[in-house]
Structures are given as C-alpha cells and as structure tokens.
Amino acid sequence: MLTTGKELRKGNFDIIKNSLKDFESELKKRDSLNAYIGVNIVLEELKYPMEKLNKYFSDEIELENEEVYIYKFFVEKQFDELIEMSKEIDKDYLKNV
C-alpha cells in the first residue's frame, strides 16, 4: 500500500505532538511547568496551530496547502525554541538534583 504525502506528514506531526505531551509531562513531574514563563508562552502559542493541524490530519477540516505550510512552519520554529529552552532547563535541573 502506498503512503500519501498527507499520511507521511501526519506521522511526523504525531511525533511532534507526542514529544510536546512528553515534554509537558516531564516538566509536571519535576514540578517545573509553571516555573518557566517562556516555556508556557511557547506552549500556549502552539495550541492553536497544533489544534488546526490535528483536525486537518484527522480529516475533520480542510486546509489549503499554504495554510498547512504556515502552521507547520510556525510549529517547527516554536518546537526548535522549546528544544533550546529544554537544554537550559535540564542544566538547571541537574544542578539541583
């Protein structure tokens, strides 16, 4: 069975979605979710585009290719920002453990 471009992108989206959930869960375990204002801002900014992409990949809504690209681009940039923040968070956490 051939996989469509949308199915491949959905797979990548699911990886990002699950990584975000894992990231938030780990911060909650560390009781640090509310300690990092920048992280909370980025997580809040990600809610809308993630919801739109989730609905698109679940075939609940239709989006133009350009809309998908814009949401994807924004999510990728914010995700990269979270990766950088998480490196600093881990450094801080390891100092205090």
Image: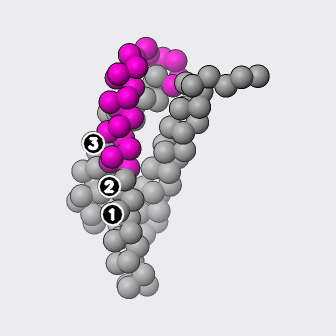
Q: Quadrant of the N terminus?
A: top right
Disc 2 + disc 1, Cβ < 8 Å? yes
User: Residue at horizontal 42%, vertical 69%?
Assistant: 30
Q: CA distance from mark 3 to mark 1?
A: 15 Å
- Disc 2 crowd rating (10 Å Cα; few below 14, some 14-19, many 20+) is some
Decide which of 5, 19 is in the foreground and name it: 5
Q: Secondary structure at mark 2?
A: helix
Q: For residue 23, what is the image quadrant? A: bottom left
Residue for badge 2: 81
* Magenta-span inclusion, residue 62: yes
Residue 19 visible at all: yes
Q: Of discs 3 and 1, which sits in the foreground?
A: 1
Type of the residue with mark 1? Met
Segment colored magenta: 57-79
Q: Quadrant of the C terminus?
A: bottom left
User: Residue at horizontal 38%, vertical 16%?
Assistant: 64
Residue 52 visible at all: no
Which label's residue is closer to the chain start, 2 or 3? 3
Q: Of discs 2 and 3, which sits in the foreground?
A: 2
Q: CA distance from mark 2 to mark 1?
A: 6 Å
Type of the residue with mark 2? Glu
- Disc 1 crowd rating (10 Å Cα; few below 14, some 14-19, many 20+) is some
- Disc 3 crowd rating (10 Å Cα; few below 14, some 14-19, many 20+) is some
Residue for badge 1: 85
Decide which of 77, 95 is in the foreground and name it: 77
Residue 26's spot in the image, x, y percent? 47, 62
Residue for badge 3: 45
* Magenta-span inclusion, residue 16: no
Q: For residue 72, what is the image quadrant? A: top left
Q: Is residue 73 above or below residue 23?
A: above
